[in-house]
Image: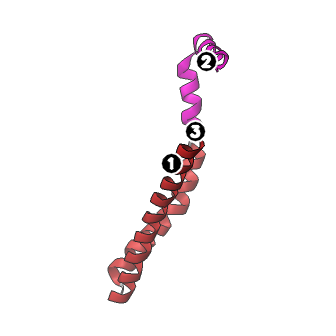
């Protein structure tokens, strides 16, 4: 591990950190764009359905969004527990 730290330190000293940061910024743009292309129409559709539909549909939408929010918390908890138990 110390050799890796020295190699990374040498990389940052020899190369301009601003160039590396610029590459990282440019690298995530396609992923962000794809995420926006997929998620924005879905989100706008849910808002439209929620505002213009009956009470039963609103309850179903509310339940599904609550379930989707809970899934990320469950995945985060499982990941944290696996990291704690593996060390």
Q: Position of residue 74 (x, y in %)?
A: 48, 60
Q: Which residue is mark 1?
A: 80
Identified at 33% across, 78% down, the residue is: 51
Q: Name which quarter of the figure residue 27 lies in.
A: top right
Marks 1 and 3: in contact by CB < 8 Å?
Answer: no
Q: Give the distance between the C-alpha atoms of the residues marked 2 and 1, in whole angstroms.
A: 25 Å
In the depicted view, which residue is nearer to us: 84 or 6?
Answer: 84
Which residue position is annotated with label 2? 5
**Residue drawn at x 54%, y 27% as measured from the top left:** 21
- Disc sitting over residue 87 in the figure: 3
x and y percent of residue 31 in the render? 59, 48
3 or 2: mark nearer the eye: 3
45 left or right, relative to 17:
left
Tell me the mark number nearer the camera, choosing from 3 and 1. Answer: 3
Q: Is 69 drawn above or below residue 2 in the view shown?
A: below
Magenta part, dominant SS: helix
Q: Which residues are magenta?
A: 1-27
Residue at 36% from the left image edge and 82% from the top image edge? 59
């Amino acid at each position: 591990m110390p050799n890796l730290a020295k190699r990374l330190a040498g990389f940052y000293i020899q190369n301009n950190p601003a160039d590396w940061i610029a590459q990282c910024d440019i690298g995530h743009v396609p992923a962000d764009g794809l995420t926006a292309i997929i998620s924005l129409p879905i989100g706008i559709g849910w808002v439209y359905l929620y505002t213009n539909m009956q009470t039963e549909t609103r309850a179903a939408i509310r339940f599904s969004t609550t379930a989707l929010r809970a899934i990320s918390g469950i995945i985060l908890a499982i990941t944290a527990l696996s990291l704690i138990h593996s060390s």
